[in-house]
Image: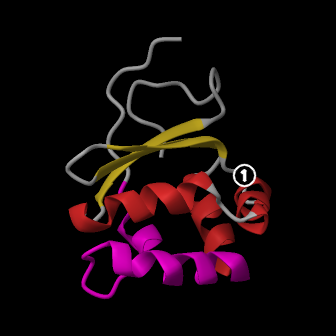
């Protein structure tokens, strides 16, 4: 999933950025929940290969996420198999309008078009 023109041999990590939208009336709850992410959820993300993971929240409910990993599809699959992730996603569903999908299923990477080391 390395963007065209970016050499995976020079940089073995994929940089993944995605956007989602939390319900604006639930944004403060989303912020609170991420201020105290469960230790077992943090451990699962790390074990799945998620590195340098950040979430940013705008006032209108827009969430921008960024992470680095060796293989995003494999990292997502590892999280999908983690029991703690199923519990976390169940907790997050009411904060989004996703037509029954879990928030992690709505993560669609944006195309990276430029990177400055």
Question: Where is the C terminus found, in terms of image quarters?
Answer: top right
Q: How is the model colour-coded?
A: secondary structure
**Location of residue 58 in the rendering, given as x and y in whole percent from the top left corner:** 28, 43
The answer to whether residue 43 is left or right of residue 109 is right
Identified at 64% across, 62% down, the residue is: 74
**Residue 105 part of the magenta segment:** yes
Say which quarter of the image contains residue 102. bottom left
The residue to which callout 1 is attached is 49
**Location of residue 22 in the rendering, given as x and y in whole percent from the top left corner:** 30, 63
Placement of 7 over or under 94, stated as above or below: above
Say which quarter of the image contains residue 26. bottom left
The stretch of residues the image draws in magenta is: 83-108
The answer to whether residue 96 is left or right of residue 17 is left
The answer to whether residue 99 is left or right of residue 104 is left
Say which quarter of the image contains residue 98. bottom left
The answer to whether residue 65 is left or right of residue 59 is right
Q: Residues within 10 Å of mark 1 (few under 14, many from 20)?
A: some
Placement of 69 over or under 72, stated as above or below: above
């Amino acid at each position: 999933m390395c963007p065209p023109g970016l050499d995976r041999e020079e940089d073995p990590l994929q940089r993944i950025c995605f956007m989602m939208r939390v319900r604006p009336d639930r944004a403060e709850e989303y912020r609170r929940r991420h201020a105290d992410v469960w230790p077992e959820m943090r451990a699962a993300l790390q074990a799945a290969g998620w590195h340098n993971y950040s979430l940013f929240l705008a006032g209108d409910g827009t969430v921008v996420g960024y992470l680095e990993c060796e293989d995003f599809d494999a990292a997502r699959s590892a999280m999908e198999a983690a029991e703690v992730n199923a519990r976390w996603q169940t907790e997050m569903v009411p904060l989004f309008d996703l037509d029954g999908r879990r928030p992690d299923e709505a993560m669609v990477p944006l195309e990276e078009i430029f990177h400055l080391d």
